[in-house]
Image (cartoon, rainbow, N blue to C red):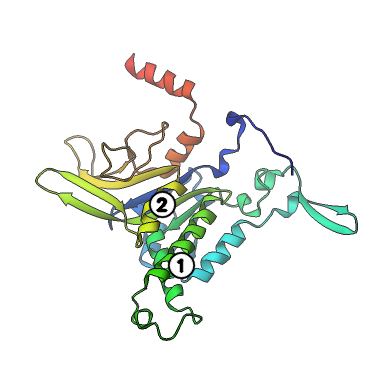
C-alpha cells in the first residue's frame, strides 16, 4: 500500500460534509433535510416513519425515497451505496488471479468510483432516534441470548445489552460517516426550557450514555432547530425556523463551521454549497464588503 499525500485544497469534498440536525417534533427536520441539495433530484432520503413521507413529497417531489422498516434493510442500503461504478472498473491479472480495480473515474459517477454517485450526491437519514429503536429491537429479539434473562423478556435491557446497542450504533454511525456522499442525519431533541430565564438546554434524544456522549464525533456540522415568532416586517409567516450552529456555553450541542453564521435559515442545500466552496480568502472579502 502506498500512502497518498494531497494538498488540503485539492481534496474531494464530495464525501466530507456530514451534518447532524436535531429538533423537537414539528421543528422542520424532515422538511429541511428533504432539500439537502441544490439539485433536488440528487437527494436520496432513507426514512423510518411513514408520517414523514407526506412532508418529503411536499418539500421535494423529485427526491428518491426508501422507507426502511428494520435494521437489515438499513444494512442493505449501506451496501448498495458502496457499490462500485462498473464504468470505472478495469480488470488486470496478478499471477493467476483476475483482479478488478477502479480506474481514474468516469463522468457518469463524477470520478468517485461509486455507482450511486451517478444518481445522488446527498444521503438523508431520517432519523437516527428511530434507527436506535431498530437496534434495540434487534438486540431484544436476539435468539442467542439466554432465555432466563427476565429483564430482556420484559423489554428492559441489562447493562451488557446496552453495550451491544452502543457497539451497533457506533458501527452504523461509522458507516454513515464513511459513505462517499454528503450525509444529513436527523434526530429528535431532548430539551429543557427555563421559561423564566428564557434559556434552553438541548441534546439529540438518544438512549445510552455511550451513544449520547460520542454522537458529536461522527459529524463535522451539528445544529439545533428552533422556532421563534417573526419580528415585524421580517417574514410573512408567524413562526421563523432557524438552525443554531453556535451557542454560548455547553447548553446546546452544536458544531459550527466558518462558512455558516451562528444562526441560519433552514436551507440545507445552501449550507452544503457554502461549506464546500468556503475559502478563508472568500470569507475575508465578504467581511470587508459588509463593513464597507
The residue lying at 36 percent from left, 55 percent from top is 212
Indicate which disc, 2 or 1, sits on the residue closer to the N terminus.
Answer: 1
| Quarter location, residue 53 | bottom left
Nearer to us in this view, 60 or 248: 248
What kind of element bears circle 1? helix
Q: Quadrant of the C terminus?
A: top left
Outermost residue toward the right in this view? 96
**Spot occupied by residue 104 in the image (x, y as percentages of width and height):** 74, 42
| Quarter location, residue 5 | top right
The residue lying at 73 percent from left, 55 percent from top is 86
**Spot occupied by residue 12 in the image (x, y as percentages of width and height):** 60, 38
Q: Which residue lies under the disc numbered 2?
A: 214
Answer yes or no: do the residues labelled 2 and 1 have beta carbons within 8 Å? no
| Residue 272 higher or lower than 58, as above or below | above
| Horizontal side, residue 186 vs residue 177: left or right | left
Q: CA distance from mark 2 to mark 1?
A: 15 Å
Q: Which residue lies under the disc numbered 1?
A: 164
Outermost residue toward the bottom in this view? 148
Amino acid at each position: 500500500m502506498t500512502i497518498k499525500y494531497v494538498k488540503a485544497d485539492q481534496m474531494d469534498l464530495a464525501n466530507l460534509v456530514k451534518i447532524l440536525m436535531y429538533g423537537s417534533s414539528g421543528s422542520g427536520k424532515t422538511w429541511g433535510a428533504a432539500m439537502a441539495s441544490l439539485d433536488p433530484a440528487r437527494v436520496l432520503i432513507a426514512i423510518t416513519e411513514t408520517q414523514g413521507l407526506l412532508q418529503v413529497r411536499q418539500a421535494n417531489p423529485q427526491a428518491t425515497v426508501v422507507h426502511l422498516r428494520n435494521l437489515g434493510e438499513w444494512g442493505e442500503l449501506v451496501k448498495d451505496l458502496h457499490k462500485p461504478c462498473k464504468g470505472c472498473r478495469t480488470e488486470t491479472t496478478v499471477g493467476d488471479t483476475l483482479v478488478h480495480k477502479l480506474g481514474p473515474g468516469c463522468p457518469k459517477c463524477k470520478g468517485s468510483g461509486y455507482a450511486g454517485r451517478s444518481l445522488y450526491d446527498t444521503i438523508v437519514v431520517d432519523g437516527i432516534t428511530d434507527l436506535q429503536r431498530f437496534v434495540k429491537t434487534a438486540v431484544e429479539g436476539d435468539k442467542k441470548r439466554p432465555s432466563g434473562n427476565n429483564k430482556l423478556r420484559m423489554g428492559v435491557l441489562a447493562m451488557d445489552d446496552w453495550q451491544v446497542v452502543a457497539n451497533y450504533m457506533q458501527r452504523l454511525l461509522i458507516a454513515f460517516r464513511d459513505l462517499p456522499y454528503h450525509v444529513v442525519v436527523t434526530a429528535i431533541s431532548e430539551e429543557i426550557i427555563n421559561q423564566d430565564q428564557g434559556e434552553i438546554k438541548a441534546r439529540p434524544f438518544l438512549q445510552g450514555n455511550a451513544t449520547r456522549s460520542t454522537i458529536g464525533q461522527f459529524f463535522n456540522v451539528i445544529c439545533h432547530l428552533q422556532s421563534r415568532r417573526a419580528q415585524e416586517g421580517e417574514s410573512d409567516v408567524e413562526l421563523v425556523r432557524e438552525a443554531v450552529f453556535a451557542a454560548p456555553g455547553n447548553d446546546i450541542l452544536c458544531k459550527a463551521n466558518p462558512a455558516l453564521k451562528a444562526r441560519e435559515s433552514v436551507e440545507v442545500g445552501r449550507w452544503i454549497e457554502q461549506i464546500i466552496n468556503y475559502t478563508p480568502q472568500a470569507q475575508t472579502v465578504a467581511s470587508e464588503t459588509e463593513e464597507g
